Image: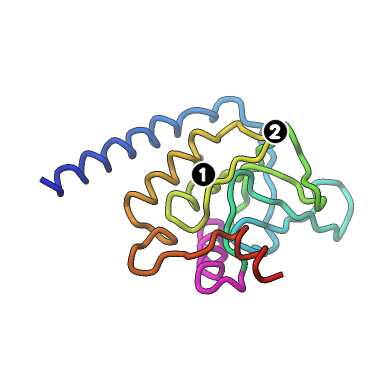
Amino acid sequence: MRFCAQLLIIFFFSSLLNGCQSQGKKLRPQQKVEVTRVATGNTLEISSLREQINLITQVRLIGTDAASRRQTPFGYRAQKRLQELIGDKPVVLEFDTQRKDNYGRTLAYIWQDDVLLNEQLIKEGHALFVARSPNHKYDLRLERAQHFARIMGKGIWNPKEPMRLTPTEYRRQFR
């Protein structure tokens, strides 16, 4: 009985995620960029969005909160997984209402081959979903990905090795 319930849950969430996958494809701005470095599990460095030479821009993935590299092993895993997802292929940045955060980083949804990498990291349990106003374009989609990861015990939600502090709590505690 429990196995059947788990299968139903998997089917439900995968159909929700797949149904959402087609949303947003039509109206995305197509701004391809080359990633020069994956700094953390939710921050990239790209060659500048401007026409200046040797200017690096930091891009923060909207709606995600990944562990810092000091929060072992979760920060390392998130960074490594984002590097694997990107590989050596360009990514497409999609912007929302607010384009910069308080630290001057560019805020974006990151797409590659019609996969929303922000969502993929959350779905695999490498990052938490955190709604950040005023950028709410994919909040429902990211929240569903987190529910899926949590139910399936993926990554930080693994009951045998759970993340004890959220990245925000960890940063506050160990500043």
Q: Would you name the residue on which mark 2 appears?
A: 134
Residue 26, quarter of picture? top right
The residue at the point 52 percent across, 55 percent down is: 127
The label nearer to you, 1 versus 2, is: 2
Q: For the view shown, which residue lies furthest in the top direction?
A: 27
Residue numbers of the magenta segment: 69-86
Q: Nearer the viewer, residue 143 or 16?
A: 143
Q: Secondary structure at mark 1?
A: loop
Q: Please say if the residues under marks 1 and 2 sit with CB atoms less than 8 Å apart.
A: no
Q: Is residue 156 left or right of residue 75?
A: left
Q: Position of residue 140 (x, y in %)?
A: 50, 33
Asked if residue 110 is among those painted magenta in the image, a careful observer would answer no
Which residue type carries mark 1? Asp
Query: Which residue bears the numbered disc 1?
Result: 113
Inspect the image, locate mark 2, and give the three-letter code of the amino acid beneath it: Pro
Residue 58 screen position, x and y as percent: 75, 55
Q: CA distance from mark 1 to mark 2?
A: 26 Å
In x, y percent, where is residue 98? 75, 36
